[in-house]
Amino acid sequence: MLQKLDEFVQGASRVLVAFSGGLDSTVLLHLLRHSTWGHRVSAVHVNHGLQGQADAWEAHCRALCGEWGIPFTSFSLSLPTDEGNIEARARDARYRVIADMMAPGDVVVTGHHASDQAETLLYRLTRGAGLAGMAGMHECREFASGWLYRPLLTQSRAQLLAYAQAHSLTWVDDPSNDVLHFDRNYLRAEVLAPLRQRWPHFDQAAQRSAAQLAEASALLQRYVAADVQRCAPSVERLGFSLDLTVLREFDESRRAAVLRAWLMTFLTRPPSFQSRAALEALCLAREDAAPELIIGEGRCCRFRDRVYFLPQWPLPKPTTRVWHRRETIVLGDGAVLIPPLEDGAPWPGGPLEIRFRAGGERVQPRERTHSQTLKKVLHEYALEPWLRDRVPLVYRGDALLAVAGVFVTSENGAEALQGCQWLYNTAAPGDPLVVSE
């Protein structure tokens, strides 16, 4: 059952078993204890506090690990029971706890088996999952700072039960598994049980289907990733963008696949199916339109034949600052202003002040012969509309020396500000939140 674990364990200091004390994780822990990697195995138990027996189950797990000589760590959680899907929230919380304790290269091992896979496929079918969702749970995948592996995914629950009985193992039974109010329990008792009675090998057939769908999904992802690169993905001063002219060459389904793959670089959950039509309308809107779409943790916008994803929106208002010397300035809205290197022109004399657009300003860029309104010039320099009220304006007294990161003016001393960098800390994707399958 553990044939593939070798390639993941090499170089890992720990194999962390998600140990609930139930049949599946008990069999898994016993298998690992007697494997060649037994000295690297640790058990992690999460006490959700949702059942009256929760503390007794934790005590059972601790005692069993003590008997088997396996390091044991437990965590207690307090989850409100009146908010949303308690099953999903407990599962997500469990994954987060384990992710937080992982060291780089650690391998997390769970006891999911073929019956769980069949249940997952049916559950996702009820939710209208697409190809990736219907590929089911992955046998192995990257997780937090290491890997998540499910070595029992091809084994049925009946096989695990036979193993446990043959080795006289003891485990705990969660009575909530019999509560049909929970969707997965209902599927297990009322749907899967009759299916297995009619087709005894249903779990194995579902596992084969999931494996084939996973293979097709992986192949599709490779093609879509190549399409994303064709669209020239760019890290912008704030957010990220794709070339809309290339996107428009694709048909609707291909365009939707590219946008979804690209957005998943920044989002913690996939865009909803309903958002597909809105994204399509955004891409095909007329050239002078300025459509916007709130999606996940950010917003999609259009500007000059590029589609943008702007994270952390709306941003706090920037604040006026005094620039006393050549130093990096934090502007208060997630942006920083970095001065040019010291080997350039002498720094302008007198204190400088960083201000922001108030309306009505006029400016003469250094390469131009006359002044124009700042609003018009920023449009001509193709500064994104959502940044025009945030771009730092560097003044010496009443003289505007530079629109930082965009251009310098014809004022004396302004040339020293050529090369200023105006950047946001969202210029690279952050680590997405842990999302369980």
Image: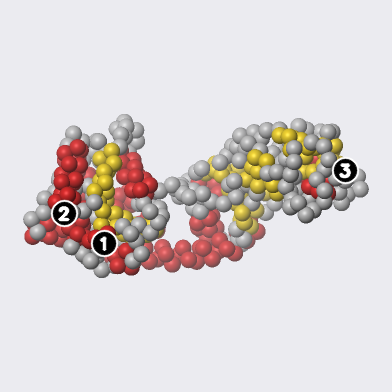
User: What kind of residue is marked 2?
Assistant: Trp
* Secondary element at tag 2: helix
Q: Which of pointers 2 and 3 lies earlier in the amino acid sequence?
A: 2
Q: At x 38% / y 47%, what residue is drawn?
A: 100
Q: At x 30% / y 67%, what residue is drawn?
A: 6
265, above or below 181, in the image: below
Q: Position of residue 203 (x, y in %)?
A: 22, 60
User: What kind of residue is marked 1?
Assistant: Pro
Kindly report the distance in space between the C-alpha atoms of the residues bearing marks 2 and 3.
Answer: 78 Å
Q: Nearer the viewer, residue 182 or 64?
A: 64
Residue to which mark 1 is pinned: 151
Residue to which mark 2 is pinned: 68
Q: Which of pointers 1 and 3 lies earlier in the amino acid sequence?
A: 1
Q: At x 17% / y 37%, what residue is drawn?
A: 53
215, above or below 55, in the image: below
Name the quadrant containing residue 135: bottom left
Name the quadrant containing residue 248: bottom right
